[in-house]
């Protein structure tokens, strides 16, 4: 719509974001109206996250940027990729997907999802994947002789990961154009780390400089002579700049560079994006944003507490359903144990790839600052670093989420396991994770670890056993992977009794009668099963998933029915290996295995997911009772 027609209509004073069908209406809006839309969009995001949880501060930071992108480009044809993918909430709202039941079962996904909308051309929950995919899309576009733009919005932490740098290195020499939006908010989940992040901070122009520059331009443009003088001085300045000022990293790699651009100014954003769209080669648009913009608690957040949130009260910023004092997350349990171990054993060094806050490691980093390293979103480097530590008389402890550990599979096999190096890997969020959905489930690490030589894999059912496994791991001479779920433990039920265990030990928690039915399982769900398990059933706590306790396994030789249940890994992992071991022993009874399906599990609550797969307490108990009836 032309400016004249825009003046003829009444200005739009409010927006109902729940009624947006597609982003085409943006073409008719002026900057004041876009500001109003941004305000309503932020309200909707805050409201949705307060009800369902989600990635709040990162989405609040890119509201204007996403609206401006949809105004300049047509993403029903053009391709838009977000890196990390959780920055897509505004994009979803503008494409007819209000955040109703965000991250809930059958609700709107917290990430781009291709089967959810024709506006979603890519999907990812892990960082640093967008530039490689965007390069592939641009090459395919040009080979197919098609005409559309490929736009990748990449955070200042995501762009520092190895895959992003590999893609930049390749893309810079190609003629296939990609528009890279560098979202520079000077935050990852917490502060980004490393020398390159410092470089991006130096590239940020001060607001006072930008304001003075704009004021000077407006003053000079008031007269014809002033306009002429401004153009002359501007050209002289650029002539000297091109010859005397060193190009930044992106220009040296072969990209055009625009910026820094104020990321909350529609005027500046539209100007920069139009310029980028007109470029003939790949271009980096460097945008400065504030993470958490528009909500005071998240604006003030310097530690990452508002990055991913549970449901909260908007006015106070406090959790809607605070956990009782007696409940502690398994992450906190292991963080506390790690603190104790690092206090006692000075040869230990803690490494984490950008999961410091999520795993509750803040106190450890403050206390042992010379022996703790947050390497940023660099999982492969984390394991490579651990290799060097282990080779030089240090005991590396790596704290990492299961889903992110997938990215370091080669280092696990080629470096740690092949050289059989002493190390302890704390695998957080092992098993189902609930609302984060397919990209973040921690269900695949168990099966692949069980097939790697030289490694030990364990999961405790109680905090006491967690400590015992941890202490036992200090004595071993190989990589030990200690898995624990995204769950809470009742501290009132902790008896504080220390248990002495050996590597590979299984515990007989309950001796059944008549060798009718035995249940082999492990992890916290075992403690939930114990009070209701029929006394006739033998209950085996398989503390170690690798190696097996062959003595305990042999004791089940005459059992009529053995149930192997794994609520924290896939059906082709621990259950299948134990089944094969029983068969190799010549076991003649019935073997029933239960595990998480080998598939990509969609978002729902953890309890809903366990119930769907028959791996919750009620389903396991029902199976046990059914087998008791069958064997009698």
Image: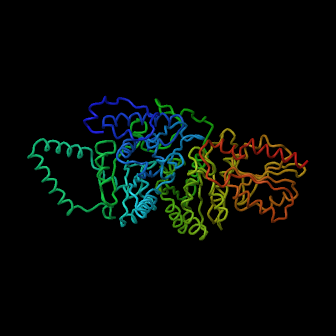
Residue 619 image-quadrant placement: top right
Residue 12, horizontal then vertical, whole percent: 34, 30
Drawn side of residue 448 relative to residue 281, left or right: right
- Vertical order, 427 against 620 (above or below): below
| Identity of the residue drawn at 63% across and 60% down | 480
Q: Nearer the viewer, residue 41 or 581?
A: 41
| Identity of the residue drawn at 68% across and 42% down | 494
Q: Nearer the viewer, residue 428 or 385?
A: 428
Q: Nearer the viewer, residue 32 or 369?
A: 32
Number of marks: 0
Q: Nearer the viewer, residue 452 or 62?
A: 62
Residue 449 image-quadrant placement: bottom right
Residue 529 image-quadrant placement: top right
Q: Quadrant of the N terminus?
A: top left
> Outermost residue, bottom direction?
419
Colour approach in the figure: rainbow
Residue 18, horizontal then vertical, whole percent: 47, 34
- Vertical order, 455 against 622 (above or below): below
Drawn side of residue 308 relative to residue 10, left or right: right
Drawn side of residue 358 relative to residue 486, left or right: left
Residue 562, horizontal then vertical, whole percent: 82, 54
Residue 548, horizontal then vertical, whole percent: 74, 61
> Outermost residue, left direction?
225
């Amino acid at each position: 719509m032309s400016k004249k027609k825009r003046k003829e209509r009444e200005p739009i004073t409010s927006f109902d974001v729940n009624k947006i069908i597609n982003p085409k209406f943006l073409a008719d809006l002026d900057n004041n109206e876009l500001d109003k839309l941004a305000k309503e969009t932020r309200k909707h995001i805050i409201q949705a996250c307060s009800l369902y949880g989600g990635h709040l501060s990162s989405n609040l930071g890119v509201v204007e940027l996403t609206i401006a992108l949809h105004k300049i480009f047509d993403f029903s044809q053009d391709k838009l990729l977000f890196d990390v993918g959780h920055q897509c909430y505004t994009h979803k709202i503008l494409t007819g997907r209000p955040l109703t039941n965000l991250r809930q079962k059958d609700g709107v996904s917290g990430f781009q999802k291709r089967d959810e909308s024709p506006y979603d051309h890519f999907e990812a929950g892990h960082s640093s994947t967008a530039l490689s995919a965007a390069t592939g899309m641009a090459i395919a576009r040009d080979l197919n002789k098609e005409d559309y733009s490929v736009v990748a919005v990449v955070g200042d932490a995501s762009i520092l990961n190895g895959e992003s740098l590999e893609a930049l290195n390749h893309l810079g020499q190609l003629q296939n154009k990609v528009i890279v939006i560098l979202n520079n908010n000077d935050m990852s989940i917490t502060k980004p780390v490393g020398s390159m992040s410092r470089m991006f901070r130096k590239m940020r122009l001060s607001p006072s400089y930008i304001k003075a520059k704009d004021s000077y331009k407006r003053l000079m443009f008031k007269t014809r002579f002033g306009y002429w003088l401004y153009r002359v001085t501007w050209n002289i300045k650029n002539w000297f700049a091109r010859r005397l000022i060193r190009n930044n990293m992106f220009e040296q790699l072969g990209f055009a560079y625009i910026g820094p651009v104020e990321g909350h100014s529609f005027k500046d954003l539209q100007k920069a994006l139009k310029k980028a769209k007109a470029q003939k080669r790949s271009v980096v648009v460097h945008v400065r944003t504030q993470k958490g913009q528009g909500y005071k608690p998240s604006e003030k957040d310097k530690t990452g507490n508002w990055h991913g949130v549970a449901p909260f009260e908007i006015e106070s910023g406090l959790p809607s359903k605070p956990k009782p004092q007696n409940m502690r997350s398994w992450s906190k349990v292991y963080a506390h144990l790690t603190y104790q171990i690092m206090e006692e054993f000075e040869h230990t060094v803690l490494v984490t790839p950008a999961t410091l806050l999520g795993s509750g490691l803040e106190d450890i980093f403050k206390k042992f600052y010379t022996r703790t390293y947050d390497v940023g979103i660099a999982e492969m480097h984390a394991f490579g670093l651990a290799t060097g530590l282990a080779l030089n008389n240090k005991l590396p402890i790596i704290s990492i989420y299961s889903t992110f550990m997938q990215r370091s599979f080669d280092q696990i096999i080629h470096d740690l396991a092949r050289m059989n190096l002493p190390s302890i890997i704390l695998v957080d969020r092992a098993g189902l994770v609930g609302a984060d959905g397919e990209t973040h489930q921690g269900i695949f690490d168990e099966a692949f670890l069980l097939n790697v030589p030289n490694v030990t894999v364990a999961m405790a059912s109680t905090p006491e056993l967690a400590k015992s496994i941890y202490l036992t791991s200090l004595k071993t001479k190989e990589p030990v992977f200690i898995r624990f779920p995204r769950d809470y433990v009742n501290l009132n039920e902790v008896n504080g009794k220390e248990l002495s265990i050996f590597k590979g030990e299984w515990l007989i928690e309950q001796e059944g009668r008549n060798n009718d039915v035995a249940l082999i399982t492990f992890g916290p769900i075992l403690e939930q099963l114990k009070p209701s398990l029929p006394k006739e059933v033998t209950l085996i706590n398989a503390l170690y998933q690798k190696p097996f306790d062959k003595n305990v396994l042999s004791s089940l030789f005459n059992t009529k029915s053995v149930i192997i249940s794994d609520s924290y890994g896939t059906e082709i992992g621990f259950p299948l290996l134990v089944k094969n071991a029983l068969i190799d022993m010549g076991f003649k009874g019935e073997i029933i295995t239960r595990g998480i399906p080998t598939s990509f599990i969609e978002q729902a609550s953890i309890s809903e997911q366990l119930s769907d797969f028959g791996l919750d307490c009620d389903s396991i108990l029902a199976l046990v009772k059914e087998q008791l009836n069958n064997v009698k």
